[in-house]
Amino acid sequence: MFKIFINFKTYPQGTGEKAVELAKICEEVSRESGGEIIPVVQTVDLYRVKQVVKIPIWTQHLDQFGQGQFTGWQNLEAAIEAGAGGTLLNHSEHPLPPGTIKQTISGIRNLKLKNRNFEAMICCKTLGQMERLVKLQPDYMAYEIAELIGTKDSITEKAPKAIKHAAEICGKIPLIVGAGIHSKKDLEMAEKRGAKGVLISSAVVLAEKPKEKLLELIISN
């Protein structure tokens, strides 16, 4: 099923109680439409959001360290305890060294060996970066052109051939695309070129009527 990941970022409209309300909207639209919508929230909001909604909730970032003497780091075990079902890694707004990404993915993989389900999406801003990081075999790969993030210039219109190339690079790993995604047409074009989902933020989080905007998007699936 084509997936819609909604990145709440640190927008005030997606923080605290507003994060709860927005996640509830995601769940309502998912239930009403049959589509799969995954809110991606701040770590501090994970627990409160998960107490209210039953759909999967992801966090925006995790660090490579485990439990113990690691003050201030966001660790995998704590995220799972708070209710996270997955995480973004290496978003263009939170880039990570390749070694850190590898270490974090390794920790997630070790967790799966213990029959604990948790998914990871590695974000890439170039195809060259994707060619290198796809070797880590995450659950998803995301392709976002950094310059288009938060704009109305969609990656599906500005770089359609690049999306197709990204899908070829990913192979069996589902490709998620983002940057400027804001319309039904964007979702349709992304899917046509091989994407299995989209990563959206401002088009929904900052919308005057986010539920209406989500319904508009998901109907195209």
Image (cartoon, rainbow, N blue to C red):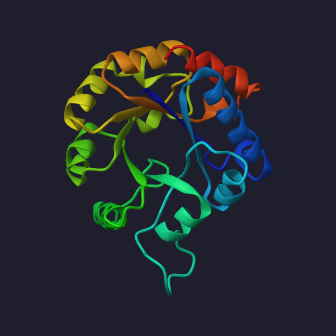
Q: Is residue 54 left or right of residue 68?
A: right
- Taking the spot 49% from the left edge, 12% from the top edge, the residue there is 185
Q: Position of residue 167 (x, y in %)?
A: 26, 29
Residue at coordinates 61% horizontally, 29% vertically from top-left?
Answer: 30
The N terminus sits in image quarter: top left
Number of numbered tags placed on the structure image: 0
Q: Position of residue 184 (x, y in %)?
A: 53, 14
Q: Say whether residue 171 is left or right of residue 145.
A: left
Question: In the depicted view, which residue is nearer to us: 202 or 6?
Answer: 6
- Quarter of the view holding residue 106: bottom left
Pinpoint residue 23: horizontal percent, then vertical percent. 68, 41
Q: Is residue 134 left or right of residue 179?
A: left
Q: Report which quarter residue 144 is drawn in.
A: top left
Q: Can residue 129 be seen in this view?
A: yes
Q: In this view, does 146 lie above or below 62?
A: above
Residue 84 sits above or below residue 100 on the image: above
Q: Residue lying furthest bottom in this view?
A: 69
